[in-house]
Image (tube, rainbow, N blue to C red):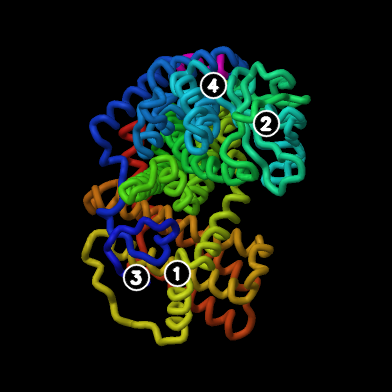
Amino acid sequence: MSDTTQKSLIGGDFLITETPAQDIFTLEELSEEQKMMRDSAKEFIDREVVPHHERFESKDYALTEATMRQLGEMGFLGVTVPEQYGGLGMGFVTTMLACDYLSGGNGSLATAYGAHTGIGTLPILLYGTEEQKNKYLPDLATGNKFGAYCLTEPDAGSDANSGKTKAKLSEDGKHYIINGQKMWISNAGFAEIFIVFAKIDDDKNITGFIVERDTEGLTFGEEEHKLGIRSSSTRQVFFNDMKVPVENLLGERNNGFKIALNSLNVGRIKLAAANLDGQRRILAHATKYANERKQFGVAISTFGAIRKKIAEMATGIFVSEAGSYRAAKDIQDKIDELVAGGMNHQEAELKGVEEFAVEASILKVFVSDLTQQTADEGIQIYGGMGFSADAPMEAAWRDARIGRIYEGTNEINRLLAVGMLIKKTMKGQLDLLKPAMAVGKELMGIPSFDVPDYSELLSEEKAVIANLKKVFLMVSGAALQKYMMEMEKQQHLLLNASEILNQIYMAESAVLRAEKHFSADSVEVAMAQLNLYKAVEKIIVAAKEGIISFAEGDEQRMMLSGLRRFTKYTNQPNIIALTEKIAAHYVEKGHY
């Protein structure tokens, strides 16, 4: 393992490079401008969205559209769009911050906002010609027009390149004639600008097009009836000999799959941000209810079973924030580095996000899984009342469920994260082979019985994380050596490896955040410690399952022995004491 202390701007490098606490960005370091944006977003949601909960739940699509126009008037739809195209031109961290605090009040609005500012706008910003950007971005940035993204088809979901929608150049060469259909299109009911993907003739890959709503041959299905996000407009979109001007081809022919992938990379990390304030609000509701609800003559917030839930919910928020903003700043720094090297900002943003695609997938999975779990525990704290639509938890649970499907299902993203790491290694972009070989050599040696000095804050936790990275290298390295080019077919193993990867990144992010800003007796340090303990337990399960599935005999025994060695604490934390400390803090505070 490398002990370098220089900040890495290589995605996935956290596995083999020690990251100093001072090199990560956290919410504690927001600028005054960013704090003003955060507070403005939160105040808007509390004033204009939360009071209208029932209208959003009753499929009031007009309310969603009207609220989006308000966001446009306030500049929130153009946070990431450069000033020359009518936006605010702010950095990646600030765009994450806006997505975070504008998404917590209602899932329908969060979906409309995310679809418009992300996959509805970014393809034009990142791949459009100057003419296309000047024509469309000012309206998108100000909310004069809204965007939608048409990729998914009845037979083409995760395999986006297998779509059957076809485009053919007209005889006069002035238009592309498009036929086909798309489904699950967010904002379709009120969007005026659509990013549409189709295959031209018999091309291998899809191509992107910009389509305006009044285009002849463009029609729409009825609004879908959905489990959650009920006021988010979701329709099928049909193309019947639809004529699109040739100048509306987006990017290059055959390049649509790349546009789709890079747009989804941005969407994945922003989806993590979009779940954060939802978690905070669920905890606030649950804690308030627990403090007010009396059973056996006392508030249920005094019961250990309830306090355990509150502590784990708060810990999940702390960890989710840590990973999300760490990765956001890494992306921003990579963009700045590329621009400083002479690359134009458009290309730099593409490359910056692409560089940290592994982290984007990790965050998408971890935070969306956790948000669903947080909402579920919120219902449990409310008890029978939590199952009622009159309480806030029922809608929160339903809205949270889509997060595990958006931007590629969590299963797809788990496979992607490990697959991308392997590809980076094979291409020589990331050296995982030497560290993996070093771990193999270490397994053959005699372990040290010296007792380390863990007198510095969180020093043992950082040592544990360093060893967890060895677990990943041990398991994935041995599996890759066995299966080689067939590794991508071993989905069970890849899912196990992904669980290890996800837990390492998030646990390290939380520990570094706590080390950077908080004292030993703080609740934040307790949350980092509690999360790490639970991460270790999850890694043990995932690694053991993987090891016994592909290794046998002496190799299996050696790896299982290594797993025990690499997941051992010198000083085991008192989990109940940590849990009680966290619970006491948030029960008294009443919110995150």
Q: Amino acid at mark 3?
A: Ser
Magenta stretch: residue 72 in it? no
The residue carrying mark 2 is 184
Where residue 298 appears, as percent x and y from the top left, is 40, 31
- Residue 473 picture location, percent across and down: 49, 70
The one nearer the camera, 377 or 219, is: 219
The kind of residue on which mark 2 rests is: Trp
Element under disc 4 = loop
Q: Are marks 3 and 2 in contact (CB under 8 Å)?
A: no
| First in residue order: circle 1 vs circle 2 | 2
Query: Mark 1 — residue?
Result: 431
**Labelled pair 2, 4 in contact (Cβ < 8 Å):** no
Q: Residues within 10 Å of mark 1 (few under 14, many from 20)?
A: some
Circle nearer the N terminus (1, 3): 3
Tag count = 4
Estimate the spatial distance between the alpha carbons at disc 3 and disc 2, rounded to whole Å. Answer: 45 Å
Choose between 340 and 174: the one closer to the eye: 174
Mark 4 residue type: Phe
Q: Is residue 576 left or right of residue 67?
A: left
Mark 3 is surrounded, within 10 Å at the Cα level, by few (under 14), some (14 to 19) or many (20 or more) other residues, namely: few
